[in-house]
Image (cartoon, rainbow, N blue to C red):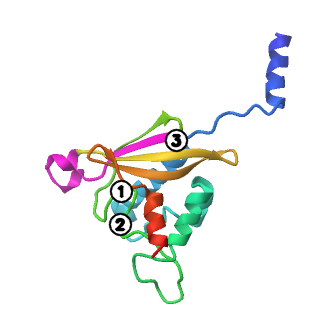
Amino acid sequence: MKTLIAASMLLISSGFAVAADMTAPVREVVEATAANWTEEAFGNEKEVFSEDRLDRVFSVDFAALYREASKNPAYDLPEGETTGFPFDYDPIARGQDGCPFQNIRVEDDGDGQVTALFNNRACMGDDPAYKQDTVLIFHVQEENGRAVIDDIYPVENGQSGQSIKDELKTIAGQ
């Protein structure tokens, strides 16, 4: 028993680190986006890419690209503003129109890949296309001891689409 206690103490004192939860930043971003697509949030949406969230759940590289792209916002800025939302659609919900998110699942696929699946088109009708899940593949990495999102790839027609970072690079270059 003393050996077990001593071994446990040695592991704790040696700086034994538990691996970061790679799904945590993905869950936060997907749940924040989902909260914006509820009737209660209409007109009171929260910024998914807020400064706080950029610093906490996104990689340094992703955050820098987002900030650079935000200098070329998709919409006119109010007087005195110099940055704004760079996309003309919701890159997580994958559109300008949608429904409250249903059946959200976040799966750690290993090797820094986390897949988020949800249905956010079901209220649009009975067409089979509206029954299909929106699928996003997040590339997650450890940075400064925590899991952060480095890129996001939409899956469209079974194929990985253009990455969000690539979109940000294009927007930043305008």
Q: Position of residue 40 (x, y in %)?
A: 37, 62
Furthest residue in direction bottom, as rendered? 79
- Mark 1, Cα crowd under 10 Å, few <14 / some 14-19 / many 20+, is many
Task: Tally the marks.
Answer: 3
Magenta stretch, residue numbers: 113-131
Viewer can see residue 108: yes
List the residue tagged with mark 3: 23
Residue 93 got which mark? 1
Q: Amino acid at mark 2?
A: Tyr
Classify the position of the N terminus by image quarter.
Answer: top right
The answer to which image quadrant residue 51 occupies is bottom right
Left or right? Give the position of 125 relative to 97. Answer: left
| Residue depicted at 30% across the width and 52% down the height | 120
Q: Position of residue 43 (x, y in %)?
A: 39, 71
- Mark 3, Cα crowd under 10 Å, few <14 / some 14-19 / many 20+, is many
Viewer can see residue 46: no
Q: Separation of disc 1 and disc 3 at Cα?
A: 18 Å
Q: Earlier in the sequence, mark 3 or mark 2?
A: 3
Q: Amino acid at mark 3?
A: Thr
| Residue depicted at 43% across the width and 66% down the height | 45
Residue 89 got which mark? 2
Asked if marks 3 and 2 touch (Cβ < 8 Å), the reply is: no
Asked if marks 1 and 2 touch (Cβ < 8 Å), the reply is: yes
Q: Amino acid at mark 1?
A: Ala
- Mark 2, Cα crowd under 10 Å, few <14 / some 14-19 / many 20+, is few
Q: Earlier in the sequence, mark 1 or mark 3?
A: 3
Eyeballing the image, is 50 above or below 78?
A: above
Assign a secondary structure to mark 2: loop
Query: Magenta includes 126?
Result: yes
Assign a secondary structure to mark 1: loop
